[in-house]
Image (cartoon, rainbow, N blue to C red):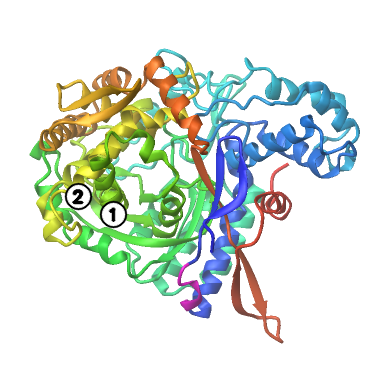
Amino acid sequence: MMTYSDERFADIQLLRYRLNGFEQLTLLQKRLVYYLSKATLYGRDITFDQFGRYNLRIRKMLEAVYTNCMIPHDTADFKALEVYLKRVWFSNGIYHHYGSEKFKPDFTPQFLREALLQTDTTKLPLRSGETIAQLCDELFPVIFDEKVLPKRVNKTDGEDLIKTSACNFYEGVTQEEAELFYQQKKDAANDDEQPVSYGLNSTLTKKDGQLTEEVWSANGRYGNAIRNITYWLNKASEVAENEHQKRVIELLVKYYESGDLKLFNDYCIEWVSEHEGRIDFVNGFIEVYGDPLGLKGSWEGIVEYKDLEATKRTQTISQNAQWFEDHSPVDPRFRKPVVKGVTANAICAAILGGDEYPSTAIGINLPNADWIRAQHGSKSITISNITDAYNKAAHGNGFKEEFVIDEETLAMIDKYGDLCDDLHTDLHECLGHGSGQLLPGTDPDALKAYGNTIEEARADLFGLYYIADQKLVELGLLPDSEAYMSHYYTYIMNGLMTQLIRIQPGHQIEEAHMRNRALIAHWCYKQGDVIQLVKRENKTYLRITDYEALRKLFAQLLAEIQRIKSEGDFEAARQLVEQYAVKVDDDLHQEILERYKRLDLAPYKGFINPVMLPVLDDKGEIADIQVNYSESYTHQMLRYSTEYATLI
């Protein structure tokens, strides 16, 4: 099956992923995957709403125009509207999924107004008594005025990060008020050794001058969506592979019903210790990258089953977790004396949803609560069928040939690159996030807006340091002691140069993972001549003069990053990120953009989900689940907007 779909628009290429080995699952396992997938898809509208309070109305309005408007569809304005709508679908709203800036439409307000007047009004998201003119008055400034809610997540130092961010987690609240509100909650807990993740599942609002939380639960905010999720989770619990897995699902349902974050802790503890089943899932308010304060969890979902062959690699790593922790180049005070419950699997994604769709991570390490990691361990996954799709799409596209310095380095990357990329992901997720410990009394949220960047840098540095260790050759994970150099080269090249293709001219780096890579690469670059940027025929290339010395720099930076995390040193985190991870060299940026443009590649990739089709027997019972890969991106998005519509 082809990896590419027939879809490409703006800066995006759509891919497909295969459910390798799905046909070998038992009928009960297939039903479990199917029910969990339905629970995953029902969270879609939550993510849209979280990413901007106008997102759902704008999406529904544009979908109505796209499917019901009477004006010709072959005009430049209509085609521009189609591209804009596809971008909205891809990013779960009107803000770029990676850069966070608001999309600029290539159609006019006059065109959209005329299109709305020629659209069936029963299909438009009009409130009771609302006119099209009133709909335009509310939504047009949000769509067309560049000054109105320009960024979903703003992390500019010195600004009120809540007031200047369009994400829909706070209403009428300042950054100072929100930070004080949650600090008081922590203080009132009186140094609880098992704290909840304050603010994770609520909207913080101000009503009559008082701050209050609107909890996301079956009977609270997002209730209709959550009730649909829990319906399918309950169906899944009926076909669970074992009693432990059934208990995990039931705890998640209880948490959704109540919104009680203590129940979320209970669920996380049970989930992280369930290893017997082949099927697993993530479903809920999880990652906090979408909140400038790093508190609120964006809704996401993924259903997965173990890739039994690829899991041998990740299990080798996790079985040696204590060795890696003991030999880490950080202060012994910051190491875990006993590493508990580190498990790692390579998995096949069966369905993606929410903040994991259409663009998804290639690895996940959960739960996020530091005390649960310390006492109960963590689960790590690397998503083998997603990685495989990315790798197939990248081969032969000319990118490496354009940016790698010479044929010798290019040959090294061709030989070892995919293997080392996968291995670094494993080390990052399986061990990096689970390594180290906070000192007693350190607030896990002490680094505030810089916490996500520091944490990603910590995990990346852990992987970078150990991918060059002879231990990996001894474990059979690398073929020789030179393979790691391919990853050192591509990682630094990305951090210094090629990730700039994802930044608009004149902008700074905002996204946490990009900041992490920039921090590591620029910090190492500033430490001497180990890393050089050289010019050849007016093109900039990376040269690494001493790979062993670079590993020592990674060790040095890892030690400092771990200290910052363990001690909760906010000021040191701020200085490190602001000095090395934010600013962009305009001249280099322009050069990279021009070179990349000539390759005619899309810098971002995303995925079309496969379609699961139940096959019923004569009694109306599910006899099999068939998988279909033919659905187009547009059809899938319009179907999801109808079939899984739960809000407004």
Left or right of 134 in this view: 30: left
> Relative to residue 253, is residue 240 depicted above or below?
below
Residue 154, given in percent of the width and then of the height, sits at 48, 22
What residue is at 26 percent from the left and 24 percent from the top?
Answer: 522
In the rendered image, which quarter contains the N terminus?
bottom right
Label 1: few (<14), some or many (≥20) within 10 Å?
Answer: some
* Amino acid type, callout 1: Leu
Q: Position of residue 183 (x, y in %)?
A: 37, 27
Q: Is residue 507 visible?
A: yes
Callout 1 secondary element: helix
Q: Point out the residue furthest to the top here.
A: 158
Q: Residues within 10 Å of mark 2 (few under 14, many from 20)?
A: many
293 left or right of 459 in image? right
The magenta stretch spans which residues?
Answer: 20-25
Q: Is residue 429 above or below residue 568?
A: below
Q: Secondary structure at mark 2?
A: loop
Q: Which residue is mark 2?
A: 483
User: Where on the picture, by quarter, is residue 207?
Assistant: top right
What is the C-alpha distance between the residues marked 1 and 2?
9 Å
Of labels 1 and 2, earlier in sequence is: 1
x and y, in percent, of residue 360 in the image = 48, 47
Front-most of 503 and 234?
503
**What residue sits right under mark 1 in the picture?**
419
- In the picture, measured across the screen, residue 637 lies left or right of residue 204, that is right
Residue 145, picture quadrant: top right
The residue depicted at 64 percent of the width and 70 percent of the height is 613
Q: Are marks 1 and 2 in contact (CB under 8 Å)?
A: yes
